[in-house]
Amino acid sequence: MIDDTEKFGMKWTAIVTTFAFLFACLAGCTDTGSGKKGDKEVKVSVPSTLSVKQDDSAKFKVSITRTKFDGAVTVKFDVPSDSGLTIDGGNEVKFNKDDKEKELTLMAKDAKDGTFSVKANATGEGVTTSNAEMKVTVTKKSD
């Protein structure tokens, strides 16, 4: 028979485990899109979530993985036009032969508050990936 102390311990363990999983996911979960053509494959990964305040910016990393080729890859971002979000440097990023990861800045200078879906896909050597999706939450700026 389980006494009240053991029940409390079991509940506490479940709560701590749940929060640890959620924190790990928010800190490091990514969404990956992949595409294949013959034996060539390319994958693009972006954070699954990102938060930014209005009139501020947030850095994020985009990474690619190539299989059976080492040429240039272009990652294109589809940013909703009604969001007011922009990517510093533009919506297209080129990865040269040795590039695997880049840090980009998402700017929310004229952004509306809400959650928006920013999609990324990569193209290289005739291979195009499916979309990797990043949910961007824009919060109102503090006064």
Image (spheres, rainbow, N blue to C red):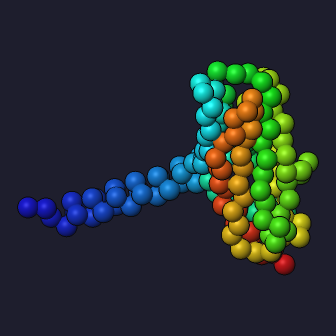
- Asked where in the image residue 8 lies, by quadrant, the reply is bottom left
Work out whether 76 lies above or below 43.
Answer: below
In the image: residue 80, left or right of residue 43: right
| Residue 66, horizontal then vertical, whole percent | 67, 28
- Asked where in the image residue 1 lies, by quadrant, the reply is bottom left
All told, the count of numbered labels is: 0
In the image: residue 9, left or right of residue 133: left
| Residue 3, horizontal then vertical, whole percent | 15, 64
In the image: residue 2, left or right of residue 141: left
Residue 121 visible? The answer is yes
**Point 73% across, 33% down: residue:** 126
| Residue 28, horizontal then vertical, whole percent | 59, 46
Camera-side residue of 10 and 60: 60
Q: Residue furthest left?
A: 1
In the image: residue 135, left or right of residue 104: left
**Point 60% across, 48% down: residue:** 31
**Point 64% across, 47% down: residue:** 130
| Residue 22, horizontal then vertical, whole percent | 50, 56
Work out whether 96 lies above or below 55.
Answer: above
Camera-side residue of 68 and 91: 68
Residue 63 visible? The answer is no
